[in-house]
């Protein structure tokens, strides 16, 4: 069941995701939830899907899917719920009620918790038997190996993959690139993804004359290939 963030390029992201699932013989649904809406229609649509598919395991990621998923799973009586946490911020000050409701649902539904870093693992201090640390939350064997990426000219490749938003820390990376250029210039930065911060990052790259060292690759559906080429992998992230 897909409920993507409705930011720039989200329709294309959903189309590619559903296409890839279909190629693997996996049926998918879209909740078609409008951003900022608390309409109960997607919630009841989710309940209908979960019941019709006879779901045994429910995995959730991101705050709104966690709210909808935990509540729907509780309503359907699911015995196994899993949440992957990518943020150490347990309470969202902007949406305090939403954060409080999620915390209550987590305590009530007792899901299994997957953390992607030691910091997040320590922050979400639920019962140890319900927590597991899986670095990055992915199967890294799919990304093993090194390749020369087209356009890199055998330079060191620094890659960052993710939506272009403040939470991802791209400004921190660009500040580091400016400082690194004062010492060496045998590298190139590949910025993969789209989002609301793109125009600001383009202006920042132009201001600091980074255009020869930073390439904006946009949204891509060949991320596995791109992940095998960076030498250092960027881990700047404020959330």
Image: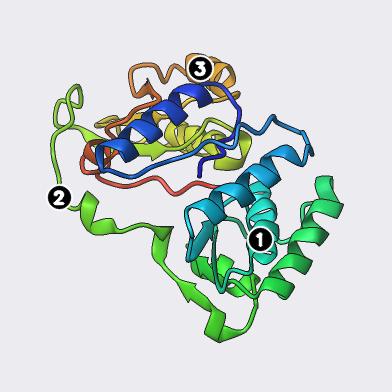
**What residue is disc 1 on?**
70
Q: Which residue is mark 2?
A: 145
Q: Residues within 10 Å of mark 2 (few under 14, many from 20)?
A: few
Q: Which residue is mark 3?
A: 202
Who's the residue at 61% across and 41% down the image?
A: 167
For residue 238, say whether it is visible: no
Q: Residues within 10 Å of mark 1 (few under 14, many from 20)?
A: many
Answer with the quarter of the image where residue 28 lies. Answer: top left
The CA span between labels 2 and 1 is 38 Å
- Along the line of sight, the residue nearer the viewer: 90 or 109: 109
Which residue appears at 56% of the width and 16% of the height?
199
Please rate how many residues cluster around mark 3, counting C-alpha atoms within 10 Å: few if below 14, some from 14 to 19, many from 20.
Answer: some
* Rendered view: 65 above or below 196: below
Quick check: can you spot residue 144? yes
SS class, disc 1: helix
**x and y percentages locating residue 94 in the rendered image:** 82, 45
- Identify which residue, 193 or 29, lies in the foreground: 29
Mark 2 or mark 1: name the one nearer the start of the chain: 1
Q: Is residue 207 above or below residue 30?
A: above
- For the image, the number of numbered tags is 3
């Amino acid at each position: 069941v897909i409920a993507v963030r409705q930011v720039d390029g989200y329709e294309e992201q959903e189309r590619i995701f559903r296409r890839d699932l279909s190629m693997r013989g996996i049926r998918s649904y879209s909740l078609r939830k409008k951003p900022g809406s608390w309409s109960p229609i997607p919630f009841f649509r989710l309940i209908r899907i979960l019941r019709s598919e006879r779901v045994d395991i429910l995995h959730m990621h991101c705050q709104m899917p966690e709210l909808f998923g935990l509540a729907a799973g509780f309503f359907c009586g699911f015995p196994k719920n899993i949440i992957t946490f990518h943020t150490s911020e347990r309470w969202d000050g902007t949406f305090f009620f939403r954060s409080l409701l999620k915390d209550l649902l987590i305590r009530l539904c007792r899901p299994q918790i997957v953390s992607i870093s030691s910091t997040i693992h320590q922050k979400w201090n639920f019962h140890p038997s319900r927590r597991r640390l899986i670095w990055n939350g992915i199967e890294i064997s799919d990304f093993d190996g090194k390749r020369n990426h087209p356009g890199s000219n055998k330079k060191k490749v620094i890659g960052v993959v993710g939506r272009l938003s403040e939470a991802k820390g791209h400004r921190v990376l660009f500040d580091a690139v400016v400082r690194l250029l004062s010492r060496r210039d045998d590298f190139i930065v590949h910025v993969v993804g789209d989002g609301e911060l793109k125009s600001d990052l383009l202006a920042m790259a132009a201001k600091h004359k980074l255009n020869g060292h930073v390439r904006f690759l946009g949204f891509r559906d060949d991320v596995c290939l791109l992940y095998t080429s960076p030498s250092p992998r960027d881990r700047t992230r404020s959330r």
